[in-house]
Image (cartoon, grey):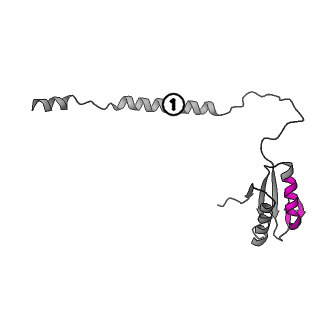
Amino acid sequence: MKLRSLRVENQPELMIIPMIDIIFFLLVFFMMSTLSMVQQQTIPVNLPQVTTAQQDKPSSINITVLENSSVMFNQEEIPLTLLAKRVNLELGKQSDTVFILRGDKQAAYGQVVAVLDELKQAGAHRVTVAVEKGR
């Protein structure tokens, strides 16, 4: 009986205070490291200009289907039959071009699908559909 009571007395205790200290230390560490990851632009620098600079982000082209089913390539109206040729020209200039398909709410659904089909047949792999965020 005496052996059993010794075992109970020698059980380790769970100290929660040091654990809380470690958690707060980790919290402060991650907060400080996150602040150092943010790019801060505090020093204004006038950069030199070059003529051979390349654009880092891919260019985007708006293709709009209006309410009357006419197709606009950026700001110019284009027939649906010539859309694939124009897309091929743009992909020849820059292969990672993003095409943004903007269809009017009142436009015929079939016309928007036809434009999307022409884009895919022309080899446009990066096509997004523009929408407005609802309330």
| Three-letter code, disc 1 | Val
The residue at the point 60 percent across, 32 percent down is 35
Q: Is residue 60 left or right of residue 31?
A: right
Question: Does the magenta-highlighted stretch encompass residue 70?
Answer: no
The residue at the point 78 percent across, 41 percent down is 56
Task: Identify which residue, 87 or 134, lies in the foreground.
Answer: 87
Asked whether the viewer can see residue 67, the reply is yes
Which stretch appears magenta?
71-90
| Residue 109 x, y percent position in the rendering | 75, 71
Residue 24's place in the image compared with 91, above or below, is above
| Residue 130 x, y percent position in the rendering | 73, 59
The residue at the point 76 percent across, 71 percent down is 106
Quarter in which the C terminus is drawn: bottom right
Q: Is residue 103 left or right of residue 13?
A: right
Asked whether the viewer can see residue 74, the reply is no
Q: Is residue 1 left or right of residue 102?
A: left
| Residue 121 x, y percent position in the rendering | 79, 62
Task: Identify which residue, 2 or 67, lies in the foreground.
Answer: 2
For the image shown, how many numbered marks are present on the structure? 1
Pointer 1 local density, CA inside 10 Å: few below 14, some 14–19, many at least 20: few
Task: Identify which residue, 23 or 120, lies in the foreground.
Answer: 120
To which quarter of the image does residue 43 belong? top right
Label 1 sits on a secondary structure element that is helix
To which quarter of the image does residue 37 belong? top right
The residue at the point 18 percent across, 30 percent down is 7
Q: Which residue is mark 1?
A: 28
Question: Does the magenta-highlighted stretch encompass residue 81?
Answer: yes
Q: Is residue 35 left or right of residue 124?
A: left
Quarter in which the N terminus is drawn: top left
Q: Spot the residue most to the left.
A: 1
| Residue 127 x, y percent position in the rendering | 75, 57
